[in-house]
Image (cartoon, rainbow, N blue to C red):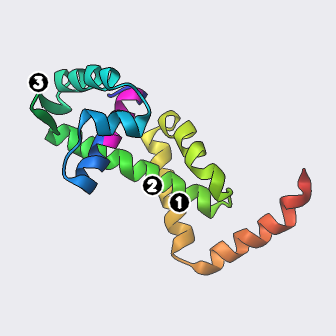
Amino acid sequence: MPTPSMEDYIEKIYILIETKGYARVSDIAEELEVHPSSVTKMVQKLDKDNYLDYEKYRGFVLTEKGNKIGKRLVFRHDLLEEFLEIIGVEQENIYEDVEGIEHHLSWNSIDRIADLVAYFKEDENRLEQLRKIQDSTDDRF
């Protein structure tokens, strides 16, 4: 299993490849706000662990394993953002909250959150009921 740091890199590489068609060290460094040398070290580690194929001075591509994990990591991130939105977390807090919790949840927890998100999305009345509960309890603190 990849470490949380490896997951961050795989997720960013996956997103960059999906949106731009490629991912460069400089792009990843900018996205993750790290030095390019840190990216190069991680790319070499991800290559060693078979998450991507890296050729010095030529670039890299995700392996099947890396692509599969990247897709699942993006799903997890998007799901958690959607979940926090559903439960009424203020928009300006959602991204940072997801970044803070995504690596600390088991995949079993992620699956259960997906069930809960689906439950609320399949019937708009459920969301309305949740909003009423939230409106009546917002004054607790």
Circle 2 residue: 78
Tag 1 and tag 2, C-beta contact below 8 Å = yes
Residue 6 in picture, x, y percent from top left: 35, 29
Circle 3 residue: 56
Q: Nearer the viewer, mark 3 or mark 2?
A: 3
Residue 141 shows which numbered tag? none
Q: Sequence order check: which comes first, mark 3 or mark 2?
A: 3
Tell me the residue at 60%/61% (across/down): 85
Callout 3 environment at 10 Å: few (<14), some (14 to 19), or many (20+)?
few
For the magenta stretch, what is the residue range?
5-12
Q: Nearer the viewer, mark 3 or mark 1?
A: 3
Please, what is the three-letter code of the amino acid marked with disc 2? Answer: Asp
Label 3 – label 2 distance at C-alpha? 32 Å
**Is residue 22 a member of the stretch shown in magenta?**
no
Q: Is residue 122 left or right of residue 128?
A: left
Please, what is the three-letter code of the amino acid marked with disc 3? Answer: Lys
Callout 2 environment at 10 Å: few (<14), some (14 to 19), or many (20+)?
few
Residue 82 shows which numbered tag? 1
Quarter where residue 101 is shown: top right
Identify whether 39 is placed above or below 105. above
Identify the secondary structure beneath mark 2: helix
